[in-house]
Image (spheres, helix red, strand yellow):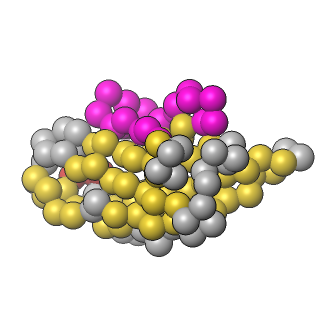
Amino acid sequence: VQLQASGGGLVQAGGSLRLSCDASGSISSFDAMGWYRQAPGKQRELVALIYRGGSTNCTDSVKGRFTISRDNTKNAVYLQMNSLKPEDTGVYYCNLKKYWSGASFDYWGQGTLVTVSS
């Protein structure tokens, strides 16, 4: 499956963006879907995950501001980002996961750049 992320851009602090990740195939069989981000000079970090059953998990720094959702009928995953801060700046990557025998098999999109100005 191929992933196409979109929706990034330049926004002022306090603003909002909605990221979309469109998959070329069905996402219903994946165990989890999520978003990671990589800030300049830093390692890639998990932002939010949504599991097949619908439960979600997100990093503490975005709780209350970001919401992850998915639409299996459109094979898409979304990240609604509100109250953006300059430290949210980075390249955001869409990710799909399959869990098998204790391991995670990951699929990655190409990333979309989010820049938050102060």
Which quarter of the rendered picture does the N terminus lie within? bottom right
Tell me where residue 8 sits by quadrant: bottom left
Q: Is residue 90 visible?
A: yes
65 lies above or below 20: above
Specify whether 40 is left or right of 24. Answer: left
User: Magenta segment range?
Assistant: 51-70
Q: How many marks?
A: 0
Which of 100 and 30 lies nearest the eye of the viewer? Answer: 30
Which residue ends up furthest to the front in the rendered image? 73
43 lies above or below 63: below
Residue 81 image point, x, y percent: 28, 43
Specify whether 96 is left or right of 36. Answer: right
50 lies above or below 35: above
Residue 7 image point, x, y percent: 28, 60
Which of 4 and 115 lies nearest the eye of the viewer? Answer: 4
Which of 93 and 62 lies nearest the eye of the viewer? Answer: 93
The residue positioned 47% from the left and 41% from the top of the image is: 70
Which residue ends up furthest to the bottom in the rendered image? 110
Specify whether 117 is left or right of 2. Answer: left
The residue positioned 21% from the left and 64% from the top of the image is: 9
Residue 116 image point, x, y percent: 19, 56
Residue 60 falls within the magenta-colored stretch: yes
Q: Is residue 46 visible?
A: no
The residue positioned 55% from the left and 65% from the top of the image is: 24
Residue 40 falls within the magenta-colored stretch: no
Tell me where residue 51 sits by quadrant: top right
Residue 63 image point, x, y percent: 37, 30
Tell me where residue 54 sits by quadrant: top right
The residue positioned 33% from the left and 37% from the top of the image is: 66
